[in-house]
């Protein structure tokens, strides 16, 4: 169980004051546990953190919560607006509720877990992050996704993986339609091991790996032919 540690009440201090304090913490700080109360849908809560902090946000947040995160483990006990964990570099962002559109957009690393559903364009242009959605995702999820893993335990909306590069998309439920250059792939032992690892990190152990299907790039939209990659 995570210790509550220090409490920051956004009904009493401004978001700027909170971020000034958190951003000033050195990477070897021992003030690692933070409890943020009364977010009341504010935008940009707990953004730009760059230390191994444990941050629990009690309530709903607006746009871009947990954005640009490095190292910190951020738990949102509520719903998140657009762009949660956008451009995350490392660490973990967990949303106990639902997330709006563009969750995990452009994120380079770390783990984003959404325990509810995610809206449109989940994982748009993801560049190495692992995203796990316990529920379903909206249309055009993983649009132009370049690297990393998107695991959807529910259904996927229209145009999944449109203009996809090399990210892996694991979907357990129905896929309404595939986007341009996205196709279903055979799932071998290597891909099953990746899926099992990502689910384990997300704390999901009650699902059968055999129920998931794998989707990836057909590589027809590349500007070069991948078989000749070594010649470039």
Image (cartoon, rainbow, N blue to C red):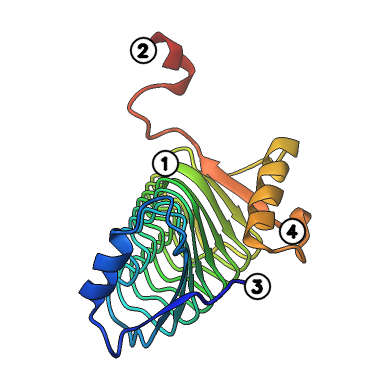
Secondary structure at numbered mark 1 = loop
Q: Position of residue 155 (x, y in %)?
A: 58, 67
Separation of residues labelled 1 and 2 (CA atoms): 19 Å
Separation of residues labelled 3 and 1 (CA atoms): 35 Å
- Residue 211 shows which numbered tag? 4
How many neighbours does mark 2 have within 10 angstroms: few (below 14), some (14-19), or many (20 or more)? Answer: few
Q: Position of residue 76 (x, y in %)?
A: 47, 75
Label 2, on which residue?
232
Front disc: 3 or 4: 3
Q: Residue at x 29, y 67 (%)?
A: 21
Residue at the far front: name it.
Answer: 30
Q: Position of residue 112 (x, y in %)?
A: 50, 60
Secondary structure at numbered mark 2 = loop
Task: Give whichever of discs 4 and 1 has the lower sequence position.
Answer: 1
Front disc: 4 or 1: 1
Task: Give whichever of discs 3 and 2 has the lower sequence position.
Answer: 3
Look at the numbered discs 4 and 1 and tell me whether their residues touch, using CB distance below 8 Å.
no
Label 1, on which residue?
146
How many neighbours does mark 1 have within 10 angstroms: few (below 14), some (14-19), or many (20 or more)? Answer: many
Label 3, on which residue?
1
Task: Give whichever of discs 3 and 1 has the lower sequence position.
Answer: 3
Taking depth in this image into account, of 78 and 38 the one nearest to the observer is 38
Which quadrant would the N terminus be assigned to in this image?
Answer: bottom right
Quarter-of-image position of residue 172: bottom right
Separation of residues labelled 4 and 1 (CA atoms): 24 Å
Q: Residue at x 43, y 17 (%)?
A: 229
Q: Is residue 39 above or below residue 118?
A: below
């Amino acid at each position: 169980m995570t210790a509550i540690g220090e409490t920051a009440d956004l009904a009493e201090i401004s978001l700027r004051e909170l971020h000034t304090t958190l951003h000033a913490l050195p990477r070897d700080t021992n003030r690692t546990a933070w409890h943020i109360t009364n977010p009341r849908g504010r935008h940009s809560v707990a953004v730009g953190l760059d230390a191994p902090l444990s941050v629990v946000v009690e309530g709903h947040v607006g746009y871009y919560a947990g954005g640009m995160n490095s190292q910190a483990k951020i738990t949102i006990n509520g719903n998140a607006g657009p762009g949660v964990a956008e451009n995350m570099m490392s660490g973990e962002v967990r949303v106990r509720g639902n997330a709006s559109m563009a969750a995990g957009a452009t994120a380079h690393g770390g783990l984003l877990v959404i325990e509810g559903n995610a809206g449109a364009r989940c994982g748009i242009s993801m560049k190495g992050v692992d995203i796990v959605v316990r529920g379903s995702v909206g249309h055009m999820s993983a649009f132009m996704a370049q690297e990393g893993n998107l695991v959807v335990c529910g259904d996927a909306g229209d145009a999944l993986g449109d203009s996809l590069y090399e990210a892996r998309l694991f979907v357990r439920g129905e896929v309404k339609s595939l986007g341009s250059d996205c196709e279903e792939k055979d799932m071998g032992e290597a891909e099953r091991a990746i899926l099992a690892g990502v689910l384990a990190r997300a704390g999901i152990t009650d699902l059968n790996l055999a129920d998931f299907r794998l989707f990836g790039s057909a590589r027809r939209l590349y500007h070069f032919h991948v078989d000749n990659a070594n010649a470039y």
